[in-house]
Image: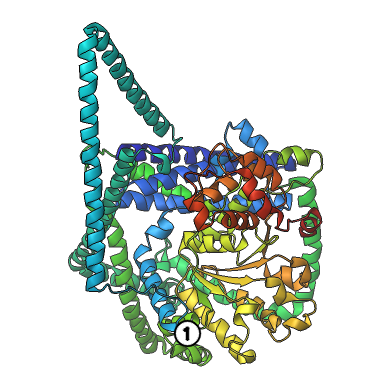
Amino acid sequence: FSISTYNKIWTDAQKDLDIQLQMEREQFLQPEKDRVKVFKMLASSYIKYMRIFRNLEEAHDGLVHQQKRAAIRQVLDGVIGRILEMKKEMVALENSEFHYIDNILEDLKLLPEDIEIPIPRYFIKENLEVLQQREKMLDEILCDAGLQTQIPVKAMTFEEAVKMIQVAERARQGRRRAVFMKQMYLEEKRKRQTKLQVQTGPNPDDAATHIQKVWHGYIQRKKTEKMREEEMIFLGMVSDASLPPHLKAMSSSQMHAKQINAQQGEVHERNEEVFIKDKLRETEGLDIKETLEDQIGQCFIECRHIIGRFPDYPTKEAGGSATIFSEKTPEQVAAELAAKKEMALQKKSQKEGKEKEKGKEKTKEKTQKTGKKEEDEGWKMAPSNFLSIMEEGSSQYKAVWQNRDEGWDLLQDHDLELIKEEKREEVDEEIRVQVDELMQQKLENLKLAVDGEKSAKQKKGRKSEKVRAASLMFLVHRTIDSLYRELVEEGVLIKPKTVYLSDYIGKYSYLGTTLRQVDIEPVPSLADVRQLIALYGILPLGSQTVHEKAPLVKALLLAGPAGVGKKMLVNAICTETGANLFNLSASNIAGKYPGKSGLQMMLHMVLKVAKQLQPSVVWIGETEKTFYKSVPKAEEQMSPKRLEKILPKFLKALKAQDRVLLVGTTRRPFDANLKPFCKVYQKIIMIPRPDYASRFGKYFKLWKHIIQQNGGVITNLLNISCLAKVSDGFTQGHIVQVVRAVLSELRLLQMPRKPLRTAEFMTPLARQDPVYREEEETFK
């Protein structure tokens, strides 16, 4: 698409966002008692936010202008976070991770594909160089350790090279000779036909009519094919794989050119930013420093006149001198300082006497308040961390980009004035830090000279630093590269398979609402599982802003029968976000880092590397073994319960700013001790076997996809519908094994003259053990 098209997509998304924000102000602030109405409001908002998310992501990926992309990115992170907040409210309302909103989709005249969560492409593109270097380093370590076999390049001898050239040359001469002989044959045939035509004497008018008819038919067929292709591409009903060669080459070259332009724009903008920042520091740095020193000094003098002594300087954690000038007068600053000290003294003196009375009053008030709230108020939307981000982005769009004339900016170059405004704030902050250090020393000297006070901050800082240094001494001497190498060599840090979430094929269930109306809990579809993996796994790990402010999910459990794609989903999370994969399965860490101290050291190493090189995924396969009720005798030597007591501490060490996710997979969750098991895993996703719509659907054909992926060709002799019906009860893993058993190397060679038939798949399918209904019921 053109730049104007992406600008229009952005404009439409911003308009939809403004309408949605206005609707939220009107509806969500008022309490609502009807839970059905509340869920409908939340679901419709969730769907609308999903459409806005899709449009913003498309505009962000399509635009080349770096400052526009930054403005869209801010709003995009806000929309993603708001979607996660909506999901949290819907889960709390229904007490279920799976929601069935097909009736709302029908009211809004939308398809299930419209609420499919898009994975933002900037997750990988923005860190592409780092990810490529890390992958290269991982391959080198694996090859050095002998854990990955590198295909050796065999040198060819002179005689072999001569023989290969001779074979190729003889084949070329044979092809040329065949073409020459064919031309001679056709020429002789043409001469015989002309002799016959001269003898019989054909009518020239009939011959001309025949030629015209054939030519007109050929031209019209070509025009119709071209028009049909263009129409299907315009409607978006043709994928890139089915494009004609000339259009595919053109689209790929356009995409490549767009990526090159975007990279060149980023480099040019970075150079301009550095130049402008240096220039601002040279021209305005001294003036900013002098004004800050004068303002802070004046504030000290005024505060001393009001309260009779100099105030305490704000700490670096509190914001330094920026907190002094947060739109407050010196009188307000002095009043706040005095009030804080008075409150501290009052708390110390009144703690003993009033604690019991306050406790009794609070319990009474709480019971009365909760009772009244449940009776009178009803449901009310929780406060959001992302509404302010979206409103700020929307106001920035209206102020800067909405009425901007784009006619002159053909190259979509960056705006120098906007860069100056951004860099001026950074220069102010840098100079403010320097001024804070200088003025803090001046304030201590003034206190000592005028009031005779000494600062006691240095001692406290030294003590805390000593404690930290003592606690982290055993990890300080190790670099991240050495820890990374050791974990790879021990097989704890592994290389994930390149699998995308879109490869997890499954169709949406259309009967969810209908079944719930009859009090039947429907089985979740594979499309619902795909959505939950994107919401709880991929989106928070991909964006730092979203992970810090969205509802925090530290641990995720994927439960389901063998072969439903649990490991595939773990690999998909890593592929879509560029995350590291740590394997802490009981079978993998058996015999490694023995003893309690060894286990603690391993987890410290994993935690340090995972935080430093985030995003990271810590995977525990067959996680029910970690929480066994009683360990089987055959597995006692493996000591599978090593991580049981230390996992809660591991999760406690993860903060909101750490993009680290613990993912467990299990096919026998009922073997675990449920209390500690459910305490560790915050979100549990049950993965069912594929239904008929997933095995044979219009867009998501599991059988067709797997057969074509393994080199098979679909013909009319192969009845996919029959295979989908017969394979009821079998998982995706079973279908993959059956297809690979049928499509051997010999069978692939026979494919052109012997097409695939339905009967070939029946015998291998009968050898597989299906998932019976009783086993599926145990997961519920």
- Which residue is under mark 1? 486
Judging depth in this view, the residue of 39 and 19 nearest the camera is 39
For image coordinates 48% across by 67% down, the residue present is 579
Where is 543 relative to 356, above or below?
above
* Residue 191 in picture, x, y percent from top left: 20, 23
Mark 1 Cα-neighbour bin, 10 Å: few <14, some 14–19, many ≥20: some
Which quadrant does the N terminus fall into?
Answer: top left
For image coordinates 50% across by 57% down, the residue present is 745
Judging depth in this view, the residue of 334 and 589 nearest the camera is 589
Query: Does 131 sit left or right of 609 as displayed?
Result: left
Which quadrant does the C terminus fall into?
Answer: bottom right
* Residue 91 in picture, x, y percent from top left: 68, 52
Q: Answer whether residue 117 is visible to the viewer in this image.
A: no
Q: Secondary structure at mark 1?
A: helix
Q: Which amino acid does the dot numbered 1 rest on? A: Glu
* Residue 648 in picture, x, y percent from top left: 66, 76
